[in-house]
Each structure stands twice: as C-alpha cells, then as structure tokens.
C-alpha cells in the first residue's frame, strides 16, 4: 500500500493571545511506495512526528492531504498501525494478551488468533515469555512486543515514532536486525521517524531529511545496498558521511534540544575520526 503526502501544511495556535501561529509544516510532499521502508530524519522541531501523526489520522493538516492506497486519510484506520516510542503496552495484560489485543478488537476467530499469536511469538523469539507480565520482561522484549502488537492484524502501513529510542546502543542494533527481518518477511510499507543516522541507513530503502524550515525536504536519499545491511561495507560508510553532511544543513538555526545535541555529537565524532 502506497502513501502520498501532498502539499501538507500544519500550524498550531500561539501559546498566548496575540502570539503568531507556529507553522510546523509548509507545503511538504513526498511518496512512499508499496513495500518500501522510508525514514524521516532531521532535528527536533522539523515536523517529523507531526507528519507521522497526520498520516495516522490523529490530526488534520491545515492544507494539503494524505492519500493511502488511493483513498484520502480523514481519520485513523485499521490499515495504518502506529508504534509509539514509549511502548504503550497494557501492564495488566500478559505478553501474549497484549499482542492478541488488536486481533480481539478486530473480532478475529479464536483459532485464528491462537495460530497468529504462535507465529508472531516464534518470529520474535518470545514464545517462552507469552505468559509473562510486561513488568517482568526487559526493555528490548517490550519493544518487540510493541512491534508484534502493531503488526498483529497485518496492517498495510506501519508508522513508527522513534521505535527504538528507549533502549541502549547494543540492544538497539539487535532490535534493528529483528525489525528488518520481520518487516521484510511481511513486506509491510513502513514509515519511521528517527534522529539516528546509522539506524536510518540500516533499515531504510530511502531516507527523507527534513529541515527546521517548516519541514522543508532537503534530501530524499535512496539507500542502494543489499539486505541484510553490512555496516562494514565501504558504501555504507559513504551513506553515513553523506547524511552527516546533510544534517549539518538541517541543524542550522534555532535552539538545540537534547536530541539535536546528540546529532551534533555524532557529526563531530565523525569529523574527528576523518
């Protein structure tokens, strides 16, 4: 299923009376083809998450439109699943029950639910944790449970907002491999918000870089590397260098947040190693 972002503009009212509107996005357009994995990369305040939530149908643009598989998006729908950064799992339900929850909401027959749950747990190596409560498993496992719940009803579009942002570096790389494996097997169309250069290259078919200039797209970079990705490949490092340079432009102007400081540290680290 394809996604078409067509001239999206989004503004929010000023905090105080008389304050000008805050224009986050202005005439932003891009496409995501069926089965493609695309990352939105850029500094905080560039409108990455706002774009994602408009595609999800959680909020409406002031102008422009979102078209998914030929139909204009006006509200949330079962064709688009959203994976939040903070897991958003139900602590009173067990692992298997969390994954099964959207299948029950969709009124999937019991036998079909059981078969699907078994398949998903095996896919993510979580079979032995089916009857554990959420507080009894690690952060990496919670992330996997959140992903399985998001794809449990075979959505045609998966939207992810910093899905691996809450885990440490080593766990993050392991989860990236599992995420890639699961989504490639499902052929799911995916759009991910991230500020991690390496993550965007490892997972994506394309990386769309947004700037603080009302979400203006300053680069739409195709990642032409075979899967699974080899982080030691010279061309992989060329992509890292290219995106690092592009991010310098995207980071220009404005006040730095913690997310931006992490990006700058990454860029400075790259430059000191060259």
Image: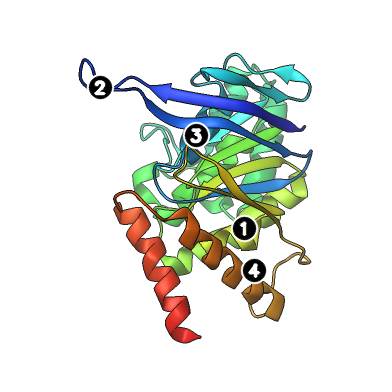
Mark pair 3, 2: CA separation: 43 Å
Percent x, y of residue 170: 46, 69
Residue drawn at point x = 64 percent, y = 57 percent? 203
* 205 vs 153, nearest the viewer: 205
Q: Earlier in the sequence, mark 4 or mark 3?
A: 3
Residue with the mark numbered 2: 19
Question: Are discs 4 and 1 less than 8 Å apart at CB?
Answer: no
Residue with the mark numbered 1: 178
Q: Secondary structure at mark 3?
A: helix
Residue count near mark 2 (Cα–Cα under 10 Å), binned few <14, some 14–19, many ≥20? few
Q: Earlier in the sequence, mark 2 or mark 1?
A: 2
Whether residue 161 appears in this view of the structure is yes
User: Which quadrant of the view contains residue 246?
Assistant: bottom right
Mark pair 4, 1: CA separation: 22 Å
Q: In the visual, does 124 lie left or right of 222?
A: left
User: Which quadrant of the view contains residue 135?
Assistant: top left
Residue with the mark numbered 3: 98
Mark pair 3, 1: CA separation: 19 Å
Q: Is residue 12 above or below residue 120?
A: above
Check residue 5 in the rendering and tell me which mark sits there, or answer none. none
Q: Secondary structure at mark 4?
A: helix
Q: Secondary structure at mark 1?
A: helix
Q: Earlier in the sequence, mark 3 or mark 2?
A: 2
Residue count near mark 3 (Cα–Cα under 10 Å), binned few <14, some 14–19, many ≥20? many
In front of the other: label 3 or label 1? 1
Q: Is residue 75 above or below residue 164?
A: above
Check residue 239 in the rendering and tell me which mark sits there, or answer none. 4
Percent x, y of residue 262: 36, 62
Residue count near mark 4 (Cα–Cα under 10 Å), binned few <14, some 14–19, many ≥20? some
Q: In the visual, does 90 lie left or right of 19?
A: right
């Amino acid at each position: 299923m394809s996604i078409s972002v067509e001239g999206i503009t989004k503004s929010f009212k000023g905090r105080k009376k008389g304050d000008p509107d805050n224009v986050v996005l202005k005439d932003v357009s891009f496409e995501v083809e069926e089965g493609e994995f695309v990352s939105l990369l850029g500094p905080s305040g560039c409108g990455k998450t706002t774009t994602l939530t408009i595609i999800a149908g959680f909020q409406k643009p002031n102008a422009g439109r979102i078209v998914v598989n030929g139909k204009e998006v006006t509200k949330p729908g079962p064709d688009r699943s959203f994976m939040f950064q903070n897991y958003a799992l139900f602590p009173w339900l067990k692992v298997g029950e969390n994954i099964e929850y959207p299948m029950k909401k969709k009124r999937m027959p019991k036998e079909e639910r059981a078969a699907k749950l078994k398949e998903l747990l095996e896919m993510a190596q979580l079979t032995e944790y089916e009857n554990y409560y959420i507080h009894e498993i690690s952060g990496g496992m919670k992330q996997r449970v959140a992903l399985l719940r998001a794809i449990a009803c075979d959505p045609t579009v998966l939207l992810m907002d910093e899905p691996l942002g809450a885990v440490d570096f080593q766990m993050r790389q392991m989860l990236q491999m599992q995420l890639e494996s699961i989504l490639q097997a499902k052929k799911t169309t995916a759009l991910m918000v991230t500020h991690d250069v390496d993550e965007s290259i490892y997972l994506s078919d394309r990386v769309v870089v947004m700037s603080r200039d009302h979400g203006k797209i300053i680069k739409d970079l195709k990642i032409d590397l075979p899967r699974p990705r080899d982080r030691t490949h010279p061309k992989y490092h060329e992509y890292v260098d290219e995106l690092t340079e592009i991010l310098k432009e995207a980071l220009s102007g404005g006040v730095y947040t913690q997310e931006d400081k992490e990006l700058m540290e990454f860029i400075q680290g790259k430059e000191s190693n060259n």
